Structure formats: C-alpha cells, structure tokens
Image: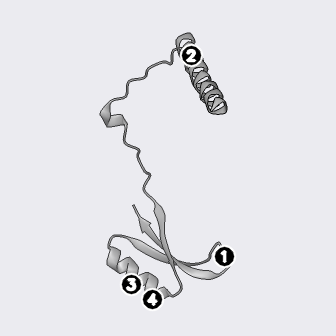
Amino acid sequence: MRMRRALVAAALGGVLALGGAATTAQAAAPAPVSKVSAGKTNVELKAGWHFYRAYWTKAACLVEGDALGGVTKCQYQRGNDGKMKWFLYRWY
C-alpha cells in the first residue's frame, strides 16, 4: 500500500512539475500568430502525369484506363520489385 501511494505521489508530482514548466515556457516566448484566409488554405497540385496503378498485362492497363476516363497512358517499366510491369498514369 505504501508503494502504491509513493508511485501515485511521484507521478502526480511529475505531472504538476511538467505542467508548471510548460506554463513558464509558454509565457516566456509567445508564438507569432499568422492569419490565413480561407482561400489560401487549399494546396494546389501542378498538372502532370500521376501514377495510378501497376498491371501485369497491357490489356488490363488499357481497360482500366478506359474505365477511368480522362487522359491516361500505360508505360512498360521495371517496378520496385525488379519485375517488368505496365504502369497506368493519369493526367490531372
């Protein structure tokens, strides 16, 4: 029972000490506040070819590209596993 009280007291003392240190640190160096309008919060992506998925056959790559719609292309390249695959890219 004494051990439990000692552990609780140590934990509570540590929390209080950290809370006091955090309060002191916050008071010492206030962070500058920057105001951003709602229009500037969106991240703009540059238009270009973006990887979509890899396929074992050219036919599967072309069928998926047609199903997605838009502008797509299939390229035969070596994957991260060292095997040749068809990579589907989308333009957006």
Residue displayed at 38% across by 84% down: 63
Label placed on residue 59? 4
Residue that carries the numbered disc 3 in the rendered image:
63
Sooner in the amino-acid sequence: mark 1 or mark 2 = 2
Q: CA distance from mark 3 to mark 4?
A: 6 Å
The residue indicated by pointer 2 is: 20
Q: Amino acid at mark 1?
A: Asp
Determine the secondary structure under disc 1.
loop
- Residues tagged 3 and 4 counted as in contact (Cβ below 8 A): yes
Check the image and report above or below for 11 versus 49: above
Residue drawn where x is 40% and y is 46% of the image: 44
Closest to the observer, 69 or 16 = 16
Residue 87 placed where, x, y %? Answer: 52, 76
Q: CA distance from mark 4 to mark 1?
A: 21 Å
In what quadrant of the picture does the N terminus appear? top right
**Decide: marks 4, 1 in contact (CB < 8 A)?**
no
Dot 4: element = helix
Q: Residues within 10 Å of mark 4 (few under 14, many from 20)?
A: few
4 lies above or below 14: below
Q: CA distance from mark 3 to mark 1?
A: 24 Å
